[in-house]
Image (tube, rainbow, N blue to C red):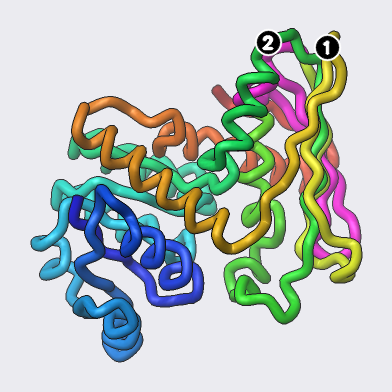
Amino acid sequence: MRLAVLGTGFWATQVHATSIAGADDAELVGFWGRDAAKAAAAGAEFDVPGTDDLDALLADVDAVSVAVPPDVQVGLAERAAGAGRHLLLEKPIGFTVADADRVVDAVRAAGVASVVFFTDRFRPATATWLEQAARAPLAGGAVSWMGSLAGSPFDTAWRREHGALWDVGPHALGLLVPTLGPVVSVQAGAGRGDTVHLVLQHASGAASTVTLSSTVAPMAGGVEVTVHGDAGRLVLLPERDDLAVVEAHRAAVAELSAAALTGGASALDVGFARDVVVVLAAVQRALASGCREPVPA
């Protein structure tokens, strides 16, 4: 599979491009960026062309791996799908349900494969954890995902504007939904900075709690993920090193290749990602109203 990376920032080069360049079943063939000079510089780092001409790049690839802000990603995904190119996207796939629907509609109209990079879902430890979680009925779960943007390469304008809810909230939902079932209602409260506290009701009857923040003190950061039921408490041990992230992305590339080859759908396609956006939008309404908000089916 011939892939181009759309984006020129830290995540685009250090994760997406590094992953594809080292993959056995994929070839990195170019970069696109809104700034031609930055695209050329990113391409030079990997000895491939870089351009600001998206149409020319799409004509020469099988798929794109997109690492740009979510609101920019929407239009790029539509254009790439319209050109018949398979999509490896970042979460969230939009900041509104309407934008998420645009991406889903474009993918389905074009009949292309899609995978959304929910990082932890592509790690072997998570697959094992999900298998263990499926062996017994679960009563609930909890996720605490806290960090600090200050001084990190992730300190970007869209994360500052939209906060941890939209940045790391998809990761939490990507782990709770497959274990406890779809979310049917949410309650939410705000803390300091961009901290939010959530109570989620799942279709299974289980409930979960989530705390998200990207503005805690550096020493207070960390990730904790658990589910519990009759068989006890099951803890997902985090992997946070750079190599693990690259390997996870490489697994996502392999999943996209398989979906494109067979015509099958990934469990982490744009449909799943759209459902995550629906929940996040309900959380926003709950934060504004102070009331429990239903999550539309």
Q: Magenta span covers which residues?
A: 178-205
Give the image location of residue 48, x and y in percent. 22, 76
For label 1, the residue is: 231
- Measuring 22% from the left and 71% from the top, which residue is drawn there? 30
Q: Secondary structure at mark 1?
A: loop
Left/right placement of residue 62 relative to residue 252 reads left
- Magenta stretch holds residue 182: yes
Q: Residue at x 30, y 60 (%)?
A: 76
Circle 1 packing at 10 Å, graded few (<14), some (14-19), many (20+), is few
Q: Can residue 19 be seen here?
A: yes
Picture coordinates of residue 125, whole percent (x, y) = 62, 37
Q: Secondary structure at mark 2?
A: loop
243 in magenta = no
> Do callouts 2 and 1 mark residues in contact (Cβ within 8 Å)?
yes
Position of 213 compared to 11: left or right? Answer: right
Residue 74's place in the image compared with 153, above or below, is: above
